[in-house]
């Protein structure tokens, strides 16, 4: 979908000595497109609490190492380790009563079905965090290049239309700036405890990635001649 937005200043003509000022026109054009999100990004975490920090580290490492080994069998899913830390839990009289460990792994995939299958299996020991759907970097670059090309053509077309409307012989570009962007949607996923998950069958989540509206805007100034 291509939408062109024009913000054009009113033309006014003064004395010849002010030709460079009154012959200049500022306007903006925009090319936009709804792009299907093709990359899923999410994180899963484990939390362990015990009176001994060594027990916390042992249990946490066991869970995370197992999750990484399982993830390695899913070639379509990229997995990497995330934040991991152990910290004290204080009780009465500000004394340490226990130790708590937190560890994460992060997943990225273009294959939503494979990612859903892996997440289903990992949720037996890990908690699912937020799920983000976005446009993959290479897709984003390709679409941005296409939108910039469309916006430049729209700018040239609009400049020519302004030139013809006022009867000018030609125009030259005085200023030209390109801006592009797009915001991906984020869908929070319910945090579920592993103990509850172990007691029931977990269906693989089915994901609908949605779209991201990508734009390329050109702000420019032309001088009519």
Image: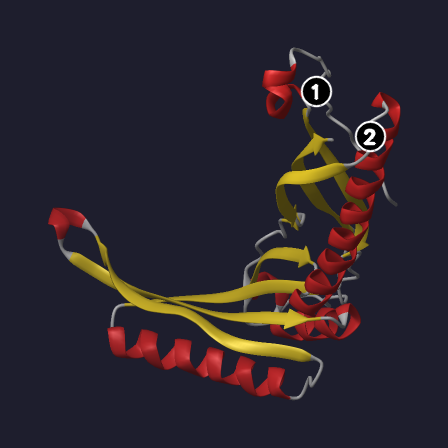
Kind of element beneath mark 1: loop
| Viewer-proximal residue among 164 and 41 | 164
Query: Which residue: 66% across, 11% down?
Result: 14
Mark 2 or mark 1, earlier in chain: 1
| Viewer-proximal residue among 73 and 28 | 28
Residue tagged by mark 2? 163
Say whether residue 209 is left or right of residue 64: right
| Viewer-proximal residue among 98 and 42 | 42
Query: Which residue: 54% across, 60% down?
Result: 193
Query: Which residue: 75% across, 39% down?
Result: 30
Residue 92: give x, y in percent of width and height.
16, 48
Say whether residue 51 is left or right of residue 101: left
Q: Residue furthest toward the front?
A: 16
Identify the image quadrant of residue 39: bottom right
Residue tagged by mark 1? 9
Residue 4 visible here? no
User: Does 123 sit above or below residue 34?
Assistant: below
Residue 180: give x, y in percent of width and height.
65, 48
Query: Which residue: 69% across, 86% down?
Result: 75
Mark-to-mark CA distance, 2 and 1:
13 Å
* Camera-nearest label, 2 or 1: 2
Kind of element beneath mark 2: helix
User: Does 80 sit above or below residue 188?
Assistant: below
Identify the image quadrant of residue 198: bottom right
Residue 78: give x, y in percent of width and height.
62, 78
User: Does 162 sit above or below residue 181?
Assistant: above
């Amino acid at each position: 979908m291509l939408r062109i937005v024009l913000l054009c200043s009113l033309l006014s003509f003064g004395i010849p000595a002010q030709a460079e000022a009154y012959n200049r026109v500022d306007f903006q054009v925009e090319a936009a497109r709804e792009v299907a999100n093709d990359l899923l990004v999410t994180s899963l975490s484990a939390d362990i609490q015990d009176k001994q920090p060594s027990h916390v580290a042992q249990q946490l490492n066991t869970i995370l190492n197992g999750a990484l080994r399982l993830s390695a069998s899913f070639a379509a899913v990229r997995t990497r380790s995330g934040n991991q830390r152990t910290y004290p839990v204080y009780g009465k009289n500000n004394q340490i009563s226990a130790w708590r460990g937190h560890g994460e792994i992060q997943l990225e995939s273009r294959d939503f079905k494979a990612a859903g299958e892996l997440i289903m299996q990992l949720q037996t020991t890990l908690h699912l965090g937020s799920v983000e759907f976005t446009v993959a970097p290479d897709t984003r670059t390709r679409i941005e290049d296409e939108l910039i090309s469309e916006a430049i053509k729209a700018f040239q077309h609009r400049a020519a239309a302004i030139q013809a409307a006022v009867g000018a012989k030609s125009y030259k570009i005085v200023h030209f700036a390109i801006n592009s962007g797009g915001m991906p949607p984020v869908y929070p996923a319910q945090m579920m405890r592993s103990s509850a998950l172990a007691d029931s069958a977990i269906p693989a989540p089915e994901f609908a990635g949605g779209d991201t509206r990508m734009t390329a805007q050109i702000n420019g100034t032309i001088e009519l001649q």
